[in-house]
Image: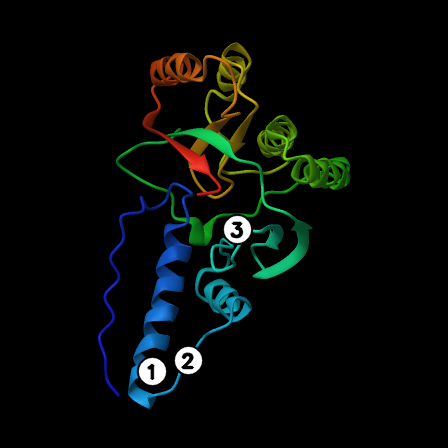
Amino acid sequence: MGATLEVRTSVPEGVGMGSSTSGVVASIRAVAKAVEAYRGSRVIPAPHLQAKLAVSAEHACDSLMFDCTSSTILFAHRMGKIVRVFNGPLPQMLILGFDTGSAERGIGTDGLRRARYSRDQIAAFGCALAVLERAIAEQSVALVGRVATFSATQSETAIQNPLKKPKFNELQRIKEDTGSAGIVVAHSGTVAGLIFDPELPDLHNRLDEARTSISRLGFSRLCSFSTPY
């Protein structure tokens, strides 16, 4: 049929915000729409097929092709498969995000080495999933924060991890000082964030304090948003 595909994105690249996956998924859906128009019949690529194609193209992908508005999924990002479905969405949270890397250059994730964890760490992840299941059932921001902080800490102490976040100890102190529920980090980029309960007293003052402290560390691209988003 002949066609030209042009991909445009406003998602920062190489920082761990899913720019590669969003571009690949958008391309898959655009091609499907073009074939649909050419054939005159509906073409709907299933989410699991989109994930399989994205992993084939990028070696790993995020799970954004799946609808997680009513459930939470555990996703094997290097296999493109759902490992587990938790009943219910994550609780409403406010995230103060920021970039711990250079604003001028991102990270090429295609050639990154895989992080390596000890047997004890891998076993502990199972306990973390049990806490996450409880957090979803109770819609507890505090428990989600504990799981996120655990995951971030394990990433920092992994046997091998090329993407450890700078000044992680300072970020933990900011979390404690501002009443943040936890730290969340991208495992394939430089972005990170502090999780806050939207019902937290003096939330705006706490956010302002966190922004000031994070800026003093030299981190950029500060942005607050609600999740699920």
Residue 113 place in picture, x, y as percent = 53, 47
Viewer-side label of 2, 3: 3
The residue where tag 3 is placed is 69
Between disc 1 and disc 2, whose residue precedes? 1
Between disc 3 and disc 1, whose residue precedes? 1
Q: CA distance from mark 1 to mark 2?
A: 7 Å
- How many residues crowd around disc 1 within 10 Å: few (fewer than 14), some, or many (20 or more)? some
Callout 3 secondary element: loop
Between disc 2 and disc 3, whose residue precedes? 2
- Residue at position x 30%, y 83% in the image: 37
- Residue at position x 33%, y 88% in the image: 40
Q: CA distance from mark 2 to mark 3?
A: 23 Å
Callout 1 secondary element: helix
- Left or right of 216 in this view: 68: right
Residue kind at label 3, given as amino acid type: Thr
The residue where tag 1 is placed is 35
Residue 209 circle label: none
Callout 2 secondary element: loop
Picture quarter with the C terminus: top left
- Left or right of 25 in this view: 141: right
Q: Residue 143 occupies which quadrant of the picture? A: top right
Q: CA distance from mark 3 to mark 1?
A: 28 Å
- Residue at position x 29%, y 87% in the image: 38
21 above or below 37? above
Residue kind at label 2, given as amino acid type: Val
- Left or right of 13 in this view: 190: right
The residue where tag 2 is placed is 43
- How many residues crowd around disc 3 within 10 Å: few (fewer than 14), some, or many (20 or more)? few
Residue 84 place in picture, x, y as percent = 68, 54
164 above or below 14? above
